[in-house]
Image: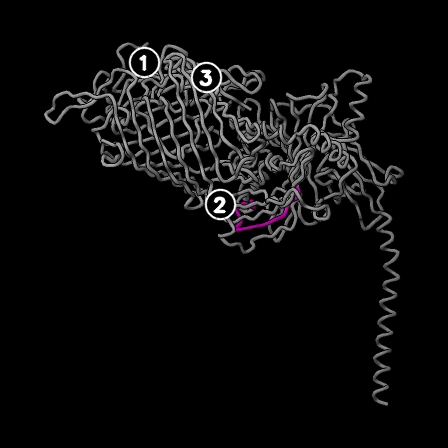
Amino acid sequence: MRVCSSKVVIIQSIFVRMKKALGLFLLLIPAWAFCQSTQISGTVIDSVNGQVLPFVNILINEKPVGTTSDIDGRFTVQPDEPVNSLTFSYVGYKKLKLEGNALKEKPLTVRLSSEGVEMQDVVVLPGENPAHRMIKNATTNRKKNNPEQLPSFSYTSYNKMYFTADKPEDMPQQDSSDMRMVQFFQKQHLFLSETISERIYKSGKSNEKVLATRVSGLKDPTFSVMATEFQSFSFYNDYFTLGDKNYLNPISGGSTNKYFFLLEDTIYSGADSIFVISYRPKKGKNFDGLEGLLYITTDGWAVQNVTAKAVDADNVSLNIQQKYKKIEGQWFPVQLNTDMVLNTINVNNYHVKGIGRAYLRDIRINPRLKNNQFSQVELEIMPDATTKSEEFWNQYRYNELSEKDKTTYQVVDSIGKEANLDRKVKVLTALSTGRYPIGPLDIDLKRLLSVNSFETLRLGLGAHTNDKLSRVFVLGGWWGYGFKDKAAKYGGDVRLNLHRNSELALMAEYQKEIPEAGRPVLLQDRKPTTQELYRRYYLGRRDDLQEWCFSIQWRMLKYLKLQVGLAEQAIGITDNYLYGVDANGVFAGVNQFNFTEAFVGLRYAFREKIVRTKDVDYSVGTKFPVIWITARQGLNNLWNGTYKYYKVDAKLEYRFIIRNLGTQNWQVTAGWVSDDVPYSKLYKGRGDYQDRLPAASQNTFETMGINEFIANKYITLYHTHNFGTLLFKTKKLEPSFVLVNNIGFGWLGQPNLHHNVPVRSFQHGFFETGLRIDNILKVNFSGLGAGVFYRYGGYQKPELKDNVAAKLTLTFVL
């Protein structure tokens, strides 16, 4: 009985609780239904062009509570009370209040009209600008809020980019061809790509793997990284990157002196306030600036949302939006939008524009990551990235593909297959590296034609095998003929690629060439920039060189590359130079020299970023100095070598930005060689002054003669400070002012060994200062300017005019 009565008590207790729960449930049903019935969702767009408007302030029933549209203009309102009205406000647009029947549309499309009035150049505010307090607080807290200052993080991202075309607003009335264009772009895009990637980050080291990629019309995945490369990941560094250009961040130190800020609105979110602040460069301030909106929350004084676009963009206009969310106590970007207009490209007068979206998910703050998870490769496209299934894609897509997206893939893929677009893209990529692929061969375009003062004109041909023949070995050869010296030059090489990750390779090379005499030779050196190539026309004294070279190279550490080997050289003289004295000091000049060298060279680039695709690895640079060192020993008892000597060459390059002042470029070069070697192994002063074709060259002495100085040990410093447009800028003119300072010292031992050439060291110091004004005239992507340089110090000439050099400058700008 006791057991039974206890069971009854339990059952009764459960029944009572069930009745209460059921009653509560029945009470909640109408409340839930009411909330569902009052939920309002929609999108906010521009009433003229239909462009979505992100971060629009939405007030419910004219009370200081509400929400904002997201980065794609979408919003959802689900209040605790009936919605009688919604008020939409956005900077630069007329305030709109919707009520009654206007709220019944599902989903709701809200069209805001532009105020049609430009912001005044000067806004006079009484007392201190209230926006400055918010900006200073955001600047003070930016290190704490910057995700790249975290010890570590990881995330997965889905990136989508497509290109389409818009009809210009001032375009005349449509004809039949215009209608066909409209119908075309209603059905599909010009181009569409998607990527899925995983990124890990730890203490400044980053590794991103592209897991899946798809590009309309192409199988080559190289273009797929495009959607993630147009803007900086975070809006907290001193400079924000749009495309390939750096812009001063409005929340960097001292930004209130450069930017005008205006508090436009205040949004209330629980206990926090979000201040909407517009920003733009102050009138009369010449710098690469942005304009847009900052949404700064009092929760940590962090950026919650931001919009930005470049001021006075030329060839490409870029607009970005970023949305941040607080995750595990840290504000972190969750969506990055990029909109661009290609101003120099159109389709039947329609402006081509690109739309990029990046959605971040699976975000982890301060995960445990190991150092061996990172290497010199920062971005890698996985080998199976182009073969992922549709099921895999659907796990990561933020939205399903639209019919327009599907049509784009279907139509452009078929066009790509028929037109062999992969082949054409590969050709364009090869052209950018100076090679043109034809079957298993890459034609070396740089070998086809060259112009210099020694040969006047050289015509030739060169080619290397490509991966269609083999990924393991590369065979190459070249031939050229100079019309002034009436002589042929030729060479060949072979390379065995043994291990990709360590870049282990064996190389052998032969060449019969006429290089500059007295030049430093650095192993693993970078290719010269466009402005450095101008000096190749001059060069001066030449060697008649025949060389065999055998070497092995590999990457020893993440950022260190080594190359060791042996070389045999036979050098003839192309002028009347003679070298040497006998043991008794009597002249015994010779003009033919045989050398055998053992060498080791290294290149160190700390935290250099490498992008790895299926076929090639390429560097995207480093923000730290890059160092080259090469050491050689002349061997007089091996092969045909007759000279014993030691030689060391070194170079350091460093480029960095000084906030509000411009960009600094530094190059330091130095070398030492035993003093009893012929001219060919010495160091000639790197001058390029001539009366003919006065074009300025980077990292050279603009006022120094071609063969004016020679040394067996030297050190030089080349320095430029590019102010950009900070000093002067108008709507039609954007010249770049560049200050140039070059210094060099060189010492020569045993000058009595060298005959029939100028023998003069520059041990007292060679100094020159100059001013370049680049891009005075800009045509598409090239700029023409001028520069003036002045020579002074121990080797200043008596006449003023002989110390001055005026030259043209030619640059390539984007």
Identify residue type, mark 3: Leu
Lower position in the chain sequence, tag 2 or tag 3:
3
Foreground tag (2 vs 3) = 3
Measured from the top left, where is residue 514 in percent x and y? 35, 21
The reply to whether the magenta stretch includes residue 152 is yes
- Kindly identify the amino acid type of the residue bearing the numbered disc 1: Asn
Q: Kindly tell me whether residue 69 is visible in this rendering.
A: yes
**Pointer 1 local density, CA inside 10 Å: few below 14, some 14–19, many at least 20:** some
- Give the mark count: 3
**What residue is disc 1 on?**
803
Which residues, given as a range, are shown in magenta?
A: 145-158
The answer to whether the residues at label 1 and label 3 have Cβ atoms under 8 Å apart is: no
In this orientation, does residue 651 appear?
no
Q: Nearer the viewer, residue 77 or 333?
A: 333
Residue 237 picture location, percent across and down? 53, 38
Q: Is 625 displayed left or right of 568 in the figure?
A: right
Residue at left offset 23%, top offset 20%: 760
Q: Residues within 10 Å of mark 2 (few under 14, many from 20)?
A: few
Name the spot of residue 534 as percent of width and height, x first: 43, 19
- Left or right of 444 on screen, residue 594: left
Q: Do the residues under discs 1 and 2 have CB atoms within 8 angstroms?
A: no
Q: From the top left corner, tell me how far across and down residue 550 is, in percent.
A: 36, 36
Name which quarter of the figure residue 591 lies in: top left
Q: Earlier in the sequence, mark 1 or mark 3?
A: 3
| Res 459 label | 3
Residue sitting at 79 percent across and 18 percent down?
177
For residue 501, the mark is: 2
Left or right placement of residue 92 versus residue 232 in this view = right
Q: CA distance from mark 1 to mark 3?
A: 36 Å
